[in-house]
Amino acid sequence: MPEATQLDQTYHYVLETIVARGQAPHYTEIARNFSIAPDEGKRMLQELMAAGLPNWLHPGTDLIASVAPFNNLPTHYRVTVEGEQKWFAQCGLEALAISWLFPGKTVEIDAPCLASGEALHVSMRDGVIEREDPSGLHLYFNIPFRKWRDNLPFA
Amino acid sequence: MNLFRSKEHARNWSEFEAGTEDGIIPLQDGAEIMSTPRHSQRLGGRAVSTAAEHAPAFFAKLREVTNNSPFWAPPTA
């Protein structure tokens, strides 16, 4: 297997930091993790955000706004693991990918229905839906998939 | 992509767009779409460098789950 690239390592550090504490790292933390200067950490973060994955910075800043499947700003997709609610999903679809990052644990997703405001709940473990309440939940997006990248934060 | 109580709730949403009915999918289909290595191996250590090689399986799953709906066709470039 080929060795991980620097982009792989940066991504891995950012994602595992969010998994561990519910918040994305600042670029100075990236720098500290790799024992490099802060500006190098910033450059690595900027390169990661330009890699074509569904991740982005707050406009005009070097602050992480979103790294799929998580959002670093609160969204209406609250995620709880082992009784701790400290994560937010990027969107309803990405919420369904979060359990892969917590192997063997039940991931609880709570969100309101945007049409009725009704509380919705999904429990997943290792990619499998264990419970949906109420039953019959659906996902919806009003832009064709091929156009999602035109405005990822909206998508 | 948002979560709704039911298909009817999605259709009744104020931001529902006519002609995008294929954009409504059951929760289980969403879980299947997010089940390929592109999403399940994000913490595998090589998520960036394997993104291109994982894309075909993801797109194939999308086509399978959505019955080849043009709404879910991947970008051409």
Image (cartoon, rainbow, N blue to C red):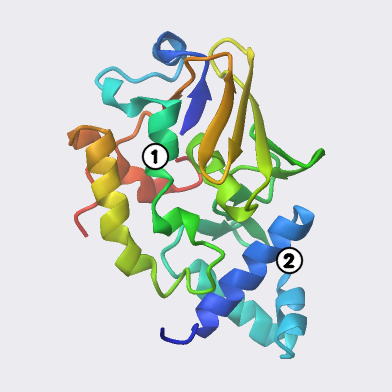
Q: On the image, which quarter does residue A61 sit in?
A: bottom right
Image disc number at residue A130: none
User: Which residue sits at x=41%, y=58%?
Assistant: B37
Report if residue A62 is visible in the image: no
Indicate the quadrant containing the C terminus of chain A: top left, top right, bottom left or bottom right: top left
User: Which residue sits at x=39%, y=52%?
Assistant: B36
Front tag of 1 and 2: 1
User: Which residue sits at x=67%, y=64%?
Assistant: A16
- Which of A36/A120 is in front? A120
Instruction: Give the residue type that dot 1 points to.
Output: Glu
Q: How many marks?
A: 2
| Pointer 1 chain | B
- Kindly identify which residue carries mark 2: A25
Instruction: Give the residue type that dot 2 points to.
Output: Pro
- Indicate the position of residue B29 as horizontal and vertical percent values: 38, 32
- Kindly identify which residue carries mark 1: B32
Secondary structure at badge 2 equals loop
Q: CA distance from mark 1 to mark 2?
A: 30 Å
**Relative horizontal placement of residue B50, taking residue B20 as reference (left or right):** right
Indicate the quadrant containing the N terminus of chain A: top left, top right, bottom left or bottom right: bottom left
- Indicate the position of residue B55 as horizontal and vertical percent values: 31, 59
Report if residue B22 is visible in the image: yes
User: Which residue sits at x=69%, y=85%?
Assistant: A39
* A74 up-or-down from B28: above or below: below
Q: Residues within 10 Å of mark 2 (few under 14, many from 20)?
A: some
**Relative horizontal placement of residue B1, taking residue B55 as reference (left or right):** right
